[in-house]
Amino acid sequence: MDLSAQQEVTAAIVNYGNSNDSAALVVRLKDQVCETIIVDNSNDIDPALSEFRHTRVITPDLNIGFGAAINLAARTLKTRWLLILNPDVRLQGNCLKYLLEAAKQLHAPLCGPRFYWDDACTLQLPPALGHPLWLLSDRHTPNQGLSDSPDLSQLAQARHVRFWKEKAPFSEPVLSGACLLVDNHWFLQQNMPIFDEDFFLYYEDTDLCGRLMRKGVIPVCVAQAKAVHYWNQSAEPPQSKATLMSQSEKIFLQKYYPGGPPPLPQSEKLADVIELGEINSFTALSLPHEACHIDIGVQEDFIVFARAMPKDASFTFSSSMWDRLRDGHYFLRAVDDNGMFLQFWHFVKQSL
C-alpha cells in the first residue's frame, strides 16, 4: 500500500460502454488512491451498486468525449495529482508509487508507465505513436542497424527496442492517455486545461504532449512503472471509432502542421505471408529457429505492434489473452536478434 498516493492522488476513469472493466478497476484502486471519480459518458453505471459505493460517479447529460470528461473531473479535485485511466488498464505492482516518485523528483507535470498487452506481462506494447511528432527528435530515431532510407516498419521497430531498453525514467515525446499521472496544480498555475476539448476522442493525448513540448516541458516515461492495457475494449460509438480518429487527425494536423505534415517513409508490402484463415481458436505456431521475437499487429505495416520473446520454438496466445482479442484481422511476424523479419502470418479471429 502506498500511503503517499492514498493521500495525494485522485484517479479519474472515463467509462463508455465498459462498466464491467470500470468496476474491476475501481476495486483494484480502492487502497491505492485518495478517491476515484468515474465520468460515465454512456450512462450505464449504477452508483448504488456495491462496487461503486466508494466511487464518485459523474454522469453528463450526453457523451462529452474523453478529454472533456477528464477536464470535468479535474475541476473537482481535492488532491494535487490526477491519475487518468482507461477502464481496460490494470496497474501492476508499485506502478503508481514509481510514477509519483518520478513526478516529484523530476518536477514532471506528466508521467506515464510502459504497457503490456496481457496479464502475464509477456507482450510488450510499443511507445505511443504520436503521428509524426516523434520524427522531430533524432534521439527517438536511432541510426544503428537502419538503412539510409528505412521504412516505417523499421523505424517502429527501432523505437520499440529503444523504448524497452530504458532502465530509469526517460524523456518520451508522446505518452498514451490510457494511463497518465498529471500534476493538476501545475496545469492550474499555467491556466492550461489538461486536454484540448476540440479533440472529442483520439489525439487528445498527443496534443497534450505537444502543448507541453511547446513550453519546453518533456513528458516522462517511468521505466519501473508497469501497467497492463487490454486495449480496444470500449464499445463502438455511433459515429464509429474510425470516423472519430479521422476527425481528430485533421484537427491535429491543422494545429501542428498548417503547411502540411512532414513526409513519412513508406512501408514495404509483406511478402510470403502464411494465411491461417478465419479461426475461433489459436493453434501454436512453429517459429523459424533464428526467431528471437514474435510481433503482433492489427495492420500489415506493423507500425504499431506488441512484442513477445518466445521461450521455445513455438508461439501461442494464452486463453485469457485470446478471449480478450476482438474479432478482426491480425498479423504476426517472427524477427531475429538483428531485427531481420523472418516470417509473416495473417489470420482473422472470428468468434463462434
Image (spheres, helix red, strand yellow):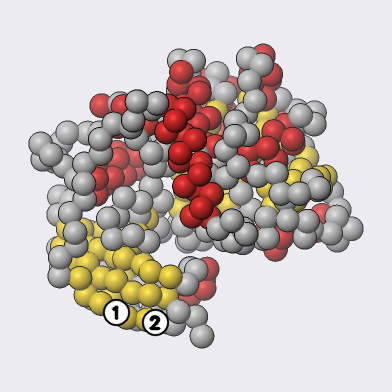
Please tell me whether residue 31 is drawn above or below residue 106 in the rendered image. below
Image quadrant occupied by the N terminus: top right
Residue nearest the viewer, comparing 154 with 114: 154
The kind of residue tagged 2 is Ile
Report the number of discs: 2
Splitting the image into 4 quarters, where does residue 290 fall?
bottom left
Image spot of residue 162 (x, y percent):
29, 38
Residue at x 42%, y 82% (from the top left corner) = 281
Image spot of residue 99 (x, y percent):
56, 34
The kind of residue tagged 1 is Leu
Inspect this view and state whether residue 129 appears.
yes
Image spot of residue 56 (x, y percent):
83, 45
| Left or right side of 88 for 11 | right
- In the current view of this chain or complex, which residue is farthest to the left? 148
Residues packed near mark 1 inside 10 Å, few (<14), some (14 to 19) or many (20 plus)? few
| Left or right side of 261 for 60 | right
| Left or right side of 161 for 94 | right
Residue at x 85%, y 55% (from the top left corner) = 47
Q: Which SS class for mark 1?
A: strand
- In the current view of this chain or complex, which residue is farthest to the front? 259
Which residue is identified by label 1? Answer: 276
Residue at x 15%, y 70% (from the top left corner) = 272
- In the current view of this chain or complex, which residue is farthest to the bottom? 352
